[in-house]
Image (cartoon, rainbow, N blue to C red):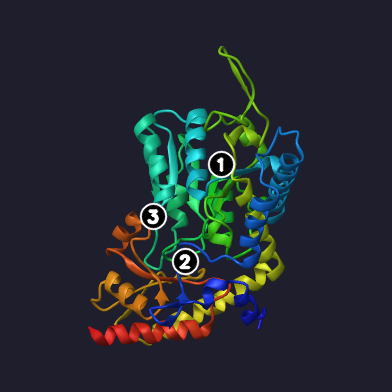
Amino acid sequence: MIYNINKVREDFPILGREVYGKPLVYLDNGATTQKPRVVVDAMVDEYYSVNANVHRGVHFLSQQATELHEASRETVRRFINARSTNEVIFTRGTTESVNLLASSFGDGFMREGDEVIISTMEHHSNIVPWQLQAARRGIAIKVIPMNDQGELLLDEYEKLFSERTKLVSITHVSNVLGTINPVRQMITMAHEHGVPVLVDGAQGVPHAAVDVQDLDADFYAFSGHKVYGPTGVGVLYGKEEWLDRLPPYQGGGEMIQTVTFEKTTFNELPFKFEAGTPDYVATTALARALDYVTALGMDNIALHEHELTQYAMNRLREIPGMRLIGEAEHKSSVVSFLVGDIHHFDMGTLLDRLGIAVRTGHHCAQPLMQRLGIEGTVRASFGLYNTKEEVDILVAGVERVSRMF
């Protein structure tokens, strides 16, 4: 055992509850993860003991809350190996991080006819912000195709670059297929054309160690709630030389240095991009979550989830009519599937009555579904606390539902 899974599960009280009289089998970690006690306790403690608005306050509670908030920024910096806390911007999550960059980068560097490259397997959060920019500025969106296994075609990716290409924005790990994209190689290829890269790391950070300097990513985004932290908080990492050049995303308190009716000067990094009161309680809890997974060991988590995913795919293949969606060579802890002619919604609804929580639908990746020629899938996504016994329960549940049809 890589770590004591039973002891780990005790840290997550919700895993002990029942649904419809059945023990909860929670396999929807791709949508959000459950929270260990240390994360929730940190939030309760700060609200009851330290709660005060951060920055500029001279009183004790404000200074203490500010220290916790900025210590959390250092925890994030260390977790992703950014060079400086100036490169760590707190947002509401990956979606806001991508929107922030799309808006600021568009304002600062893009004009009509310029291009952004994305991929076939992007989440809507990494498609729609660029479509909004296309509508406002007349920029063009180019799409990297993929093969039937769910792997991006790098030869085709290379062909997409032109003198008008300003940015590449790609997912680290597909939330539908589980494909782990070769982002380091893709970043190198983009840099050879002088093009910066944003990586959507929402499904990457929870499952394996991420080193933004090693990747040489210009920007990297992730969400707290997918890495065992609270909802409503996330991170946009950006190289300092890029963030210095980008205009602010929102205006208001905290992001200013001086304001007159004639002119405003902006704050230094990272505060230039953090207008308004931050969720300083959530940032503290996010830091606790990152400390928690660090203590378990990201390599240990990755190995545990890899074994679980391989076991699940092998067991599911035993079911007649099973169609696994996404069988890339390098794959994270997501298994999407369809069985015969059973609608994914029906399968998910009936599995729920057995206490098994999976996700059904298009998973905010409708263009990917169109590429696959399907409406949606059933998705089981694993976390650090899931077990082979839970996989067995899933397989038995799918077999039971299949027999009903």
Disc 1 vs disc 2: which is toward the camera? 2
The part of the image, by quadrant, that contains residue 276 is top right
Q: Where in the figure is residue 157, as x and y percent of width and height?
A: 45, 51
Q: CA distance from mark 3 to mark 2?
A: 14 Å
Q: CA distance from mark 1 to mark 2?
A: 24 Å
Q: Where in the figure is residue 362, as x and y percent of width and height?
A: 33, 61
Q: How many residues crowd mark 3 within 10 Å: few (<14), some (14–19), many (20+)?
A: many
Q: Nearer the viewer, residue 153 or 105?
A: 105
Residue at x 62%, y 76% (from the top left corner) = 10
Residue at x 44%, y 41% (from the top left corner) = 116
Amino acid type at circle 1 is Pro
The part of the image, by quadrant, that contains residue 201 is bottom right
Looking at the rendered structure, the secondary structure element under dot 1 is loop
Mark before the other along the chain sequence, 3 or 1: 3
Q: How many residues crowd mark 2 within 10 Å: few (<14), some (14–19), many (20+)?
A: many
Q: Where in the figure is residue 88, as x and y percent of width and height?
A: 65, 44
Contact between labelled residues 1 and 3, with CB atoms less than 8 Å apart:
no
Residue 3's disc is: none
Q: Where in the figure is residue 82, as x and y percent of width and height?
A: 69, 48
Can you say which quadrant of the picture contains the C terminus? bottom left
| 13 lies above or below 228 | below
**Residue beneath label 3, please?**
120
Q: Nearer the viewer, residue 235 or 182?
A: 235
**Residue beneath label 1, please?**
196
Query: Horizontally, is 106 left or right of 252 in the view?
Result: left
Q: Does residue 261 show up?
A: yes
Mark before the other along the chain sequence, 1 or 2: 2
**Residue beneath label 2, please?**
178
Looking at the rendered structure, the secondary structure element under dot 3 is loop
Amino acid type at circle 3 is Thr
Contact between labelled residues 2 and 1, with CB atoms less than 8 Å apart:
no
Outermost residue, front side: 48
